[in-house]
Structure formats: structure tokens, C-alpha cells
Image: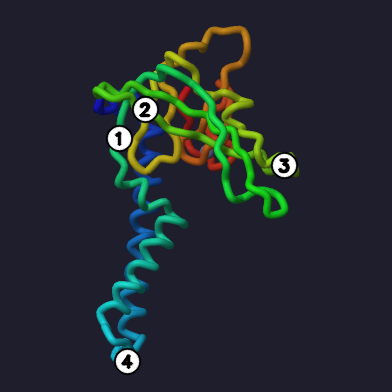
Amino acid sequence: MTKPDRSRLPASFRADYRRYILTRILASALLFLAAGFLCTRIDFTNLRYPAMGIVMVYAAAAALACILFRLHRLFLPSWQGTVTKVGAFERICSTGNRGQPGRRMMVELTVDRGEKKPYTLSLFRSDKIANGAASVNLFQTHAPYKEGDTLVYLRGLRYPARIDVADADELFEPEYVCPFCGEFYTRERKTCYRCGKTLLF
Ligand SMILES: [Zn+2]
């Protein structure tokens, strides 16, 4: 797997990234501390296996850290790669209207990360403002990733960032994805208007 060349990334972006990661680690650590405290307060001796009670409290803390602070993303490796294909496929999901199974158009990126097998990632973000159109995928309507783009993913982030863009000089305004929160932006922006972090390009 090709490792990203971090020196190519702007210093302000790297500083924002360090802060982002540190906040998540500290917040998760606080959750685990709270779980430890909780274990001293709950009497597990009535349980058949008292140790299981402690395990359950810590498992709940870990699950909460993944939901709230995306702790699991910190365990994904960082990589750099080139988009070789942008495709789409339909996924049936349980969150449809009135109990009906929903259908989602997923955008699938195939990325060459310098390994034997190509890496794929499926993307979906719905437009919450367009009511009743939850199956509209913003990654399909905005198409922020293009074939030939060089992407960088740093562990802990939500989305990979385009660092070398195939369509930068094309007539239409190219769009980018904020790797921290997933908001779309155009080239003239320096910071994300949703999360305030430094953007690439
Ligand atoms: Zn953002």
C-alpha cells in the first residue's frame, strides 16, 4: 500500500488533522475512564460471571466511542492512490419509507493503492433538505471524485481528499469533499463552512 506523502499537505491542514485526531483520542479516553468509574459503582457480584459485567460496560463505552467519535476509523491505515473507476450500484437498505425496503444508489470508487488488488469504497450521503428524496446520493449528483484523481486518506478521517485533480482545468467548477466532515466545496474556499477546518486546494 502506498503511504501518503504528508509533506505535500499544507501545514495548516496537518495542524487541523492533528487536533482532530487528538480530540477524538481524548474524548474516547474520557469515555473509557467513565466506564472504569462505572464499574467501581455497580455491584456485579450477583451476576453469574461478574467479569462479564465489566466487559459489557467497556464494550458499551467502545461502541459509544465509535458512534460519537468514530474511534474505529483510527485503526484504518493511511494510504495514497489513484482513482481508476467511478461506478454506481443499487443497494437495498432497511431504512425505506413506511416500512418498505429502501433503495440507494451507491457511488463506488475503485482505487489503485499500489497493491495487487484494487481497493473499492462505496459512498453515500443523502440530501436531508430534499424531503422524501432520501435515496438521492450527493456523491452521484455532485460527483466530487473523478477518474485519474490522486486521493489521500489519513487514518481517522471520514473521506479521502483529492490532492491531484484530473479535471481541475475543465470548464465547470470542480467540487471537492471535506475529508473531515464530508461537506462539498468549490476551489475558492480555504476553510470548510460546516466544520471550519482547512481544506485542500
Ligand atoms: Zn468540513
Q: What residue appears at the point 35 percent right and 58 percent down from the top-left corner?
A: 26
Badge 3: residue crowd in 10 Å (few <14, some 14–19, many ≥20): few
Residue under label 1: 78
The local secondary structure at tag 4 comes to: loop
Give the percent coordinates (x, y) of residue 167: 51, 11
Q: Find disc 2 in the rendering and name its residue.
A: 152
Could you say which quadrant of the image residue 133 lies in? top right
Q: Earlier in the sequence, mark 3 or mark 2?
A: 3
Query: Which residue is label 4 attached to?
Result: 46
Relative to 39, say whether 65 is above or below.
Answer: above
Nearest the eye: 151 or 147: 147
Query: Mark 3 or 4 closer to N-term?
Result: 4
Q: Nearest the camera: 114 or 99? A: 99
- Mark 3 residue element: loop
Q: Tell us which disc is closer to us: 2 or 4.
A: 4
Amino acid type assigned to the residue bearing label 4 in the image: Asn
